Image (cartoon, coloured by chain):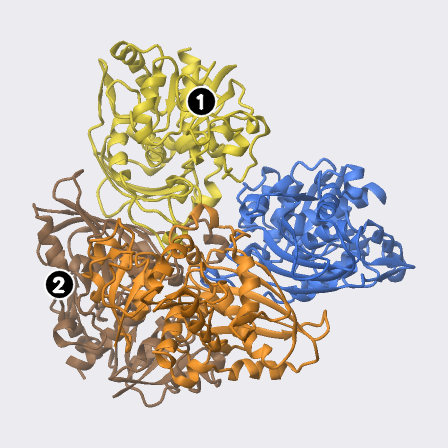
Chain colours: A blue, B orange, C yellow, D brown
């Protein structure tokens, strides 16, 4: 067992980390760090538990520590659910000594920090060596992408492996949990939707191409097509839905695309990683699926569900589909944990 | 005053007709037709009133009649809120004698039936003469497009007038009222969304090009670009939201597009028609607008609100925006009424 | 293993039966009956699956049969999720030969039909003998109460065992699933609530007293206090919430009431029945609980959660609390299954 | 015209004040006060407008001032939408010179401060003289009750005038707007409800009896019956719903209660005050009404709608009903404005 901790342990993604780490066969959760307001209290007092599951017994009495490398004790991996601005300051300090598997956006675009989806670009972990050399760290930082980007990129990968993509348009309908527990007031979203999520479109447009890019002598060369995103918040608790329009360079058979998605597996599946879904992408044929309430929890929230896969007669070589992915599991805590499982398997 | 009636008067769009016709300065609502189950009853007994407004006093005691030309009495114009399958059968029978301003989809694509948005293609009313000649009718049918199409096309028109459009991708987030009162079970939509609306995408892709097409010697030549739609139902009562991605043939200045939208006016504005909004398209600069609950009722629900107008750096000559339009006012009852006001002004 | 079937297998409660019977250690689900429209089809074709879980593989290929005693084959127990009007006609016919564990309201108030919550009044099963004698049946019918009644009565029982109750006022906030999949249109409930549920108040007022009554020589003598209910539908998917006000005859200590609830156990707990929750009533001390989304699934949806237990200073000897219970599990399918488990243990 | 100002002008209730004061025939809104963060900015910059209506043109350019008596200039009446803790400090300072019509709870229970619903206890305004004498103020403070209390008390008043009330139990289902724009996170309320609102039950239990009490030589003697409240937050934007159970001392005819409610009028109706609804209480006979989305806006949001008026067979001399009232109009801004209209009419 590897001792692990969670940074930002009282927030919503922090709680998902705790929920997913309970009973994890390889990771023993021993450290919970949060703001100084929480430090010194048992976790059961420090945190308002927001999830539908109950707070695991095993963490109730853990004393929350400060978010500082001197406080976290005997751990190897720290999962970071910190806000971006704090992450930018403290993650590098933790990385001097620890492995930081971060869900924060702060370090994702640093050239020597791997931004990884294990099924998509595990080879980017090669950057770790460079990172440690560049920065003189004993530990390192590995990041996962934004929630919407993960779901999109998992579905693009089997297409990208088989076809040349020319364009991607994506319009999202995102769950309120993505903004944190208090991020979206009910007054803003009941009988309503909000067609703006700060920074989200830029992340989707940048990170997707980065993830599908190539690592070439220590430099990531982004994929060469265009991605245009329009991001919207809808009254759904968990589960992001995305309408995707793709133009390919060449002709295709829809059944081949379907099969590429259905049969897609990555390194986590081959290695049998604990949190890896059997199928990263599940394709449904029902005309009214996927739906967030029905499909977000597929394979423990780690599989992305695709539906309405159809040709797009309006344009040449074009197709469309709709996807649903769980934004705080596959899109956040589960993403970091899968990264850490991969690191444990191939690096530690 | 012109005597008018409503076909399908007890349904949700029927009720919007009644609400909008109360106190109308040119139309006197004298006839309400519905199924034989309702016929013979006073309207207040026949209908469950679904709108937030109260049922107008003036219609409470009107006796509902059968949906049959022999029952409707002394009227000139009949507004049709009939389901498509019934409309296909009975609207032609009414048109033998009456003017039918129909919101139903049944006759929209008949080559001699005008499909009209008064601000967009009023000249299509020239088809009426042909229709009457072809069919030997004393009356005629004029139709308005699908709710999502109207809002989209109103915003495309000022662009189309000034630029060559190459592609339009549109992803909708549609209100539940669009499916009729009982169309979307609450179990289907609470903490959820449904990424499918039967026939909607086809309507948006076909009707938009038809409306922006040209009437050439009695034949409509559709506009020559491509439209691809993905349609989704969200937990919003009224007001459709649409994310629109447009590629133009040539370069453009965003401020020019903005100005074209803001200053856009059509024949209804020039003629000062009663239900015509001052500005068919209102552009907002707030980064988180338009929102359906906040913007659907603009100008009595007859104006479409555009926001997040921005360039699309992913592709050449491309831009994006989000729109909100009231689906049962501008997108249904109000559309038919504006058609009728135009007909009264230029034909009767 | 006892072979069992489900009547009304395609509806929402029918699906909960199927979900709960998958992997049941004592019941083998072999028969699924539904309307003639579904009969002859494999279940996967006959049913639209409404639950968030996936349709169990084990039922996908079961051929749905007609709701008729001649069709159900080799089963001992039939779980009934039939509508009341159909149940009234067909349940007696099934009971000639089979055990019918019914969630329908039709037969609940028949004097020789046990209306049972296993933790509350298991002794009412003694009526079975009388029922079989009266009606000449080889099988019999046992019923469970209405969903709101079950949750209320489970919390009243430990109080009633220790104090004389004078009055109960209860105001419910009920989930939409209680009306069946299509029972509550989204137009009726988004940004809204409906303060009326047909027949619900009468059921709560009658069934509660019946359940807490005494079986005296084959006749149920209802409990002697008053129950007044006001029932309301709110925009919640699953889980009924009830605000309960109780006046006792005598003084009480709140901590004693709390302890009576917390330590309450019934026959199912003593017998270790498979679906019996460890604690039928769980008391929470957090000031803002219970909440339906957070607490409905406690102990597999079989425990009722009580919170805000507090004295009522406005009246003598009075107290108040709020409860949440899962309406389609503890309040429907799970109730019938627990009845059947009890029957298997003490009768079969 | 009387010059008036709003304290707490940028919050949700502050915005309702502004909306209701636009075009008011007697009050000219000249002053908007808010926190120092907003002071010095034009209102259109200082405030995020939360209401569905548009921000009135007339206030866009008003420069927001500090919440200090020295800043508000030439006004006679100040409407207070301040939080209770700030109100407690600053309202007395304003009252040295100005009339303060306050929606805040801070001063409601001060013995010499009138807590008034104009239709219920206008005579409590006699306390003003005492207040000015006690405190040496040239101005004074008048308050209105809590939102839930106003709606409840308006419906109790016509009963209390005609019968002796013994008990009132009330269970509320309250809109999220009652907690202010950011008061209820969407994560807390989607597919959920929260059975707790801090301080609300105490306010309902105390204020109701105070309002129905008697002013006896400068002292309010509260009404002598008991009120027990259980308060719950539900996913509704605006409009509080309350289930009310009443026990009277004596027999009654339901039709007499109905008529007392329907014909109830108070001083505002007799004086024809501008914001007074024609009928303070409207009784509906439809079995599924009142509903918040349908009924909250009745008579501009100033009338309370009662439905499901029925006898309560469980207890002697008992009846039940459900009410809906608009919480930020009749229950807040409109309440203060009606108080001010009454003061202008009978005092100024």
Q: Residue at x 26, y 53 (%)?
A: D289
Q: Nearer the viewer, mark 2 or mark 1?
A: 2
Q: Secondary structure at mark 1?
A: helix
Subunit bearing disc 2: D
Residue designated by label 2: D264
- Placement of C257 over or under C121, stated as above or below: below
Image position, residue A14 (x, y; %) = 63, 51
Image side of residue C60 versus residue D328, left or right = right
The single residue placed furthest to the bottom in the displayed view is D74
For disc 1, the marked residue is C269
* Above or below, D323 relative to A76: below
Q: Which residue is the extreme one toward the right?
A: A217
Query: Does the CB distance between marks 2 and 1 fall below 8 Å?
Result: no
The spot of residue C31 in percent (x, y) is 48, 21
- Is B172 in front, or is A135? B172
**Which residue lies at the image location 17% right of the left edge and 69% below the top edge?**
D278
Subunit that carries the residue with mark 1: C
Is D297 rendered above or below residue A328?
Answer: below
């Amino acid at each position: 067992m590897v001792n692990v901790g969670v940074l930002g342990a009282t927030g919503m993604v922090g709680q998902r980390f705790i929920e997913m780490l309970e009973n994890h066969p390889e990771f023993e959760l021993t450290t919970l760090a949060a703001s100084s307001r929480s430090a010194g209290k048992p976790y059961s007092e420090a945190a308002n538990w927001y999830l539908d599951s109950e707070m695991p017994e095993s963490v109730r009495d853990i004393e929350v520590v400060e978010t500082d490398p001197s406080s976290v004790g005997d751990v190897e991996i720290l999962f970071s659910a910190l806000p971006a601005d704090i992450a930018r300051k403290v993650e590098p300090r933790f990385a001097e000594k620890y492995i930081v598997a971060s869900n924060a956006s702060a370090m994702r675009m640093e050239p020597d920090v791997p931004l990884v989806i294990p099924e998509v670009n595990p080879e980017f972990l090669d950057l770790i060596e460079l990172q440690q050399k560049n920065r003189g760290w004993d530990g390192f930082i590995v990041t996962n992408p934004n929630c919407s980007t993960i779901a999109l990129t998992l579905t693009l990968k089997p297409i990208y492996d088989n076809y040349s993509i020319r364009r991607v348009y994506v319009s999202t309908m995102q769950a309120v949990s993505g903004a944190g527990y208090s991020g979206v007031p009910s007054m803003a979203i009941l009988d309503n939707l909000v067609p703006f999520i700060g920074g989200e479109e830029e992340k989707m447009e940048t990170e997707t191409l980065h993830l599908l890019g190539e690592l070439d002598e220590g430099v990531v060369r982004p994929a060469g097509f265009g991605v245009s995103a329009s991001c919207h918040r809808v009254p759904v608790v968990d589960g992001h839905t995305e309408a995707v329009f793709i133009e390919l360079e060449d002709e295709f058979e829809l059944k081949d695309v379907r099969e590429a998605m259905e049969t897609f597996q990555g390194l986590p599946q081959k290695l049998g990683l604990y949190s890896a879904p059997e199928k990263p992408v599940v394709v449904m044929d029902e005309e009214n699926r996927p739906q967030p309430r029905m499909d977000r929890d597929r394979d423990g929230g780690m599989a992305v569900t695709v539906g309405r896969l159809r040709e797009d007669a309006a344009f040449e070589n074009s197709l469309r589909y709709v996807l649903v992915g769980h934004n705080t599991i596959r899109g956040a805590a589960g993403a970091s944990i899968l990264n850490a499982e991969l690191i444990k398997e191939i690096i530690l």
